[in-house]
Image (cartoon, rainbow, N blue to C red):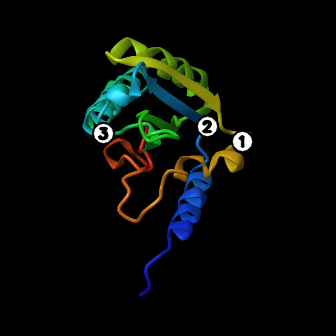
Amino acid sequence: MSMMTKQQIRTAGADWIAAEKFWLFGTARYVDGSAVRRCTLVRDAKHFFNTVDRAVLNRKDYDEGRRLQRLVFHEQGMFGSNAHFHFFIKGTHLRQYKHILELCERNWKRHIKAASDCKVLDNIELIHERKFYCWKEFRSLDNETLITECCHLEKPHYT
């Protein structure tokens, strides 16, 4: 079996994003991204998404480990010194769209000490335009672009 090239991985990743049909695309930034290490960013992202999950999902689903479906990507910025993350997210039914958007923008600053802002944009109309965006910093096969600790894609079993 041959090893995939970086471009093949980027293309497969972009196709994966498009296939999931995420509703929203977000960028969470820090006041000083140069002072944020990956372990801090991952810890903050996990906490941030837990606040959103708890607010959107009912207690039973949350307690049983269900989460909003999302993919989360670590980035260092153009010059490699501005840690932040991007994410694609969707809820269990479209009525949650606006609630998730507002929660993400509000909870990032509310719950994360060094947070600057979180901008969340519609992704329904632009999914094919954004599907490659989070793979731009994937430069080597050992690159940790995807924050797997924060990603959830299981098909929920809601009642």
x, y percentage for residue 4?
Answer: 47, 75
Residue 49 in which image quadrant: top left
The image's mark for residue 23 is 2
Mark whose residue sits in front, 1 or 2? 1
Q: What residue type is labelled 3?
A: Arg
Q: Horizontal placement of 9 versus 148: left or right?
A: right
Q: Can residue 23 be seen in the rendering of this structure?
A: yes
Q: Can residue 49 be seen in the rendering of this structure?
A: no
x, y percentage for residue 108?
Answer: 42, 20
Mark whose residue sits in front, 1 or 3? 3
Q: Horizontal placement of 125 versus 101: left or right?
A: right
Q: Which amino acid does label 2 sit on?
A: Trp
x, y percentage for residue 144?
Answer: 36, 53
The residue singled out by tag 1 in the image is 126
The residue singled out by tag 3 in the image is 38
Whether 103 is drawn above or below 27: the answer is: above
